[in-house]
Each structure stands twice: as structure tokens, then as C-alpha cells.
Image: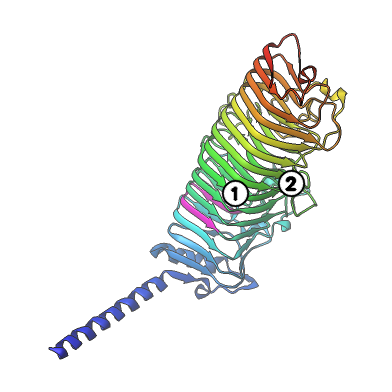
Amino acid sequence: MSVIRKWKAGLFLTMLSLFQLMLAESLWAQIYDIRNSGAVGDGTTDNTLFIQKAIDSCSVTGGTVYIPQGIYLTGTIVLKSNVTLHLSAGSTLLGQPASRFYPYQNSGIPFYGEDWAKQALIFCKNQKNVAIEGRGTIDGQGAAFVTTTLKKPDRYRDRPYLLWFAGCENVSVTDVQLRNSAFWMQHYLGCKKVRIDGISIWNHSNKNNDMMDIDGCSYVTVSNVTGDSDDDGITIKSTSPLVSEHITITNCVLSSHCSAIKFGTESVGGFRNITISNCVIKPSAQEKTIYGKPAGIGGLAMEMVDGGIMEQITVSNLVIDGPEVPIFVRLGNRARKYVATAPTPPLGKMKNINISDIVATNAGITGCSVSGVGNAYVENVSLRNIRVEFAGGGMAADVSRKIEELEDHYPEGTMFGKLPSYGFFIRHVKGLNMSGISLSTKTPEQRPAFFISDAESFSILDIAAKQVTPTLVMVEKSKNGILAAKSYDFPSGNLLKKDAESKNVKVRLE
């Protein structure tokens, strides 16, 4: 019996070893090393066809295309379903420095920009289960694409994105380093279930160097991103009727010469059910600018000017150091069509927005603002626990300066010039609740901390301002408001100044 048992045990072990070997071979067969397709990592060989061959083979079985250590020069490569592009540590995908290596692509989704944004280093359309991962680098050599002599709209042409995903599902981009795009660094257009985590971004080589554009996508998570860009940072867009919705952004460290976190400017479909939290915004490491300001124009910019709806948005726990305008909320009426044959967008809607727990330092002289237009009000806005340090230096003459509506203008935190308040300028707003607002200035101010114009149903509670100006809050053409402050901080005569058109605006000293 012992001989039979030993024979059975030996047979079992042999079969197990064969199974393990078959499994290992099966797993290895799903890893496609680009060197086996002919790729050479010498920085000069054009590897476009070799990398594409590996991707095409991998898409049949599903698996991983492996980029080993080395510098692999390439033009456009097309990512396909069930393929993970893995960049090992020490590897670089280096974009060809000329437009001819980037054939025009069609996203299949009509969007504003489709006439000129047609190229990408990595392109992926209508695919599922695709990923880019690893500790390697993708570098677009964007400075090689000269645009200084071109005029609109041609100045946008023939500059490829670094990454372009359109109409895809289950997209993952993790850990990689993205560098030097000729245009936007990443464009996610009309995608579902997108995960962006742990990536590092540097984009200061050309015009329109956005860090990331989430455009008409749903079920998106963005986390643990460290990025520095000349143009806008993490940007949520709606360049088509597709709504950007069900999005979370968290735990990021961002720098931008323009706006670090931005909604818009394109807003055709709109934005819904989005939360942003636990992010640090700091001055760029790149002092030389193409657009914007070295420390940034805006921290948080929420802009609706091409129709659409913005609703159910929560922003919390931001540290903002440096941008001229830490908070800018704007409903305008540029009404730009997303394609020539589309109807003119109607006035957009902006409502149910909560912004809380913000600490901002080194802001400029401009001031923050929440503003709609005369026939389109921003509705139901909450600003809580916000502490801002401004530059100061405003004069009494700034208070009476007429602030034009500019409803059809490009929205930017500095668009109105120096505001009539050093803290918050509120205009065309219904349902505003501000509490726990603490404001200070580095130099003396003659403007009020708050200027309220054409507002309805508003409250400003628990006010703290180190700069006691002749008037703390100015109110015009508004109704149904309440202001509250500690009596020892603000003599009653300094708290409120209102015009004759304002009705039922009350003061409460605590």
C-alpha cells in the first residue's frame, strides 16, 4: 500500500507542477514586451509601428504591453480594449517632435474644438478596460510645436494632446509621470468609469498647457495627483451636450499659472453631483509664464457661460496659497455654440453649491466674487468657514467704480478689475448663506469687506475682519438679508451701509 500511496503522491506532484508551468506560461503569454516586436530604446529609433504591433497582439488575448527601461521615440499609438500599457521605472515614451507623426483622429463625439483638436500621442476611442500604469514617463516634447506665428483658430491646430480618451469605459491612468504636452496634457471626452490616481504632471512647454480636462464624463475619481501647469489645472469641462457628473477629486497638490481647479469655460451640458476635497494649491515652480500669473490667477474657478446646468457641487478643505483670486463663481452668457449647426445655448443655471473650510493666503488686490447676470441668478450658495488673506491697498474711489456686467465675456477671476470690496463681491444671487468668514489684508484698505448688489434672501453671519474699514458691508438693490457680527469687533455704525432700494436688511450684534 505504501508503494501505491507514493506513486499517487508523485503523480499528484507531477500534475501540479505541470499545471503551475502551464499557468505561468499562460500569464507570460499575456505580457507583450515591445522589444519582442522590434522596439529599441535608444531615443532615436522610431518605434511607432513596433509599439502598435505589441498593442494589437495584446488586444487579441488581453494583457499587458510592457515598456522596459529606455527611451522609446514614437508617434501616435492607439490603445485598445483589455490592454494595459505598463511603463517600467526608467522608461520613457518620447513623442516625436513634429506634427506629421500624429495623424488626425475622429473622436466620434461632436464637441467644441473638434475642428482643430485632432491629434494625440496616445489615442483611445470607444474601447473598454484600458489602462496606463507604472513608474515611467510619457514626454510629449511640446516645445517643438511652435505656435507663436499662428492666429485663431489656427493657433490650436497640429498640436497633439499627450493622452486622449474618447467614448471609453473603465479607463485607468495610475502612477505615471506625464511631461511636456504640445496642447492639453489629458483629454477624457465622453468616458464612463475613469480612475486617475497617483500621477505626476509637468506641463510648461506650450500654449493651452492644461493639466487635465474631464469633459462630459461620468463616474470619475481623481486622487493623489501632483501637478504643475502653465494653463488651467484640474479642469472639468462640458464641450458637448454630455454632462460631467458623479465626479470626485481629492488629495491633490496643484500649481497653475491660470486656475488650479476649474469648471468650464465650456458648459454646454453642464456639471452635476461633484465633490472636491483635501487639496493644496500652491505657486508654480515655473516662474516664467505663457499665460496667467506666476502664482496663478485663480484657486477655485466655477464658470458657466455656454448654457448648461451646474448643481449639487461641494468643495471643501482647500489650502490656497498665491493665486490672485482664491474663489471665483460666475454665471455668464457667452452662449457659444459647441458646433456650428447647434442651436445657440440658452442661459445656464447655477444652483446648490457648497464651499467650505478654505484657507487662502497671499491673494491679490482684486477680491473674490460670486456673480450672475441680471436675468440669470446664481441660486442657493453656501460659503462656510473661509479664511482669506488679501494684499489690500484698495482706495475709496474703487467702491463707487461701475462694474460692468460683461455677460458675454470670457470668464476669469480678474475680468471685472479691482472689485468694490476687498473680500467678496456678490451680485445677482438668490439664497446666499455665508458664515465663519474671516478676512484680513496685508496693507490698509478703504473698500468694504463685502459688497452686495441685487441679492435676495442672504445672510452673512459670524463675520471677522482685521481690516476695519469705514464700512464693513455695503448693500445695494437687495432685499431680505441679515448680517451678524460681534459687537466688540464692529461698532454698529461701521457694520452696514445700504441704499434706499434695499429692503428688509437687518443687523444683529452679538
Q: Secondary structure at mark 1?
A: loop
Left-right relation of 182 to 338: right
Pick the front one: 18 or 441: 441
> In this picture, is 49 found above or below 297?
below
User: Which range of residues does the magenta coloring cover?
Assistant: 162-174
Left-right relation of 337 to 85: right
Magenta span contains residue 278: no
Q: Residue 327 appears at what percent x and percent y?
A: 69, 35
Distance between the alpha carbons at the discs numbered 1 and 2: 25 Å
Residue placed farthest to the top in the image?
500
Q: Which mark is residue 118?
A: 1
User: Does residue 371 show up?
Assistant: no
Task: Name the residue beneath numbered marker 2.
Answer: 257
Check disc 1 and give the amino acid type: Lys
Pick the front one: 275 or 93: 275
Pick the front one: 510 or 12: 510
User: Does residue 420 show up?
Assistant: yes
Q: Residue 506 appears at what percent x and percent y?
A: 68, 14
